[in-house]
Amino acid sequence: MRVRRLLPFLVMLSLMASLGVVLAQGEGAAPPSENKSMAMAISVGLSSIAAGYAVAKTGVAASATITERPELFGRTIVYVGMAEGIAIYGLLIAFLIWIG
C-alpha cells in the first residue's frame, strides 16, 4: 500500500536523476552511451508504469461515475487522458537525454 503512494515520487526522482546524468557532464563532455541508454530506459519505463497505474485508478473511477451519471462521460475521459500524459513526459525526457 505504501509503495503505491511512493510511486509518483519515485517516477519524478528517476526522471530528475536521468536528466541529471546529461546535465552533470557539462557542455564539453558527452556522457557514455551506456549511461544515456540506461537513463532513457529508466525515464520511459518508470513513467509508463506510473501512467498505467494512474490510468487504472482514474479509469475505474470514471466508469463508476459514468454508471451513475452518464452525462459526465466527457469530463471523466479528460481525467483519464491527463493520467496518460505521465508517459508522454517520460518520453520527452528520453528525447532530451538522447539529443543532449
Image (cartoon, grey):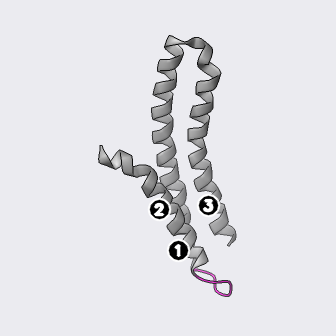
Task: Provide the residue designation for mark 1.
Answer: 35
Disc 3: CA contacts within 10 A as few (<14), some (14-19) or many (>=20)? many
Q: Measured along the vertical axis of the image, is residue 86 above or below residue 64?
A: below
The amino acid type found where label 3 is placed reads Ile
Residue type for callout 2: Leu
Q: Residues within 10 Å of mark 2 (few under 14, many from 20)?
A: few
Image height check: is 21 above or below 67?
A: below
Q: Can you identify the residue that label 3 sits on?
A: 93
| SS category of the residue bearing label 2 | helix
Which residue was labeled with disc 2?
Answer: 13
Query: In the structure shown, which secondary structural element does the residue marked by tag 1 occupy?
Result: helix
Q: Quadrant of the N terminus?
A: top left
- Give the label, 1 or 2, closer to the camera: 2
- Residue 41 location (% of width, % of height): 52, 61
Q: Which of the marked residues, 2 or 3, is nearer the chain's N terminus?
A: 2
Q: Quadrant of residue 30?
A: bottom right
Can residue 42 be seen?
no
Label disc, if present, on residue 71 of the rendered structure: none
Determine whether the residue tagged by mark 3 lies in a helix, strand or loop: helix
Q: Are marks 2 and 3 in contact (CB under 8 Å)?
A: no
How far apart in space, not on screen, are marks 1 and 2 (Cα)? Answer: 16 Å
Q: Residue at x 60, y 18 (%)?
A: 72
Q: Which residues are magenta?
A: 25-31
In the rendered image, the quadrant that contains the C terminus is: bottom right
In the image, residue 38 above or below residue 54:
below
Q: Earlier in the sequence, mark 1 or mark 3?
A: 1
Q: How far from the left and from the top, in percent, is residue 20?
A: 55, 72
Majority secondary structure in the magenta region: loop
Q: Is residue 57 left or right of residue 100?
A: left
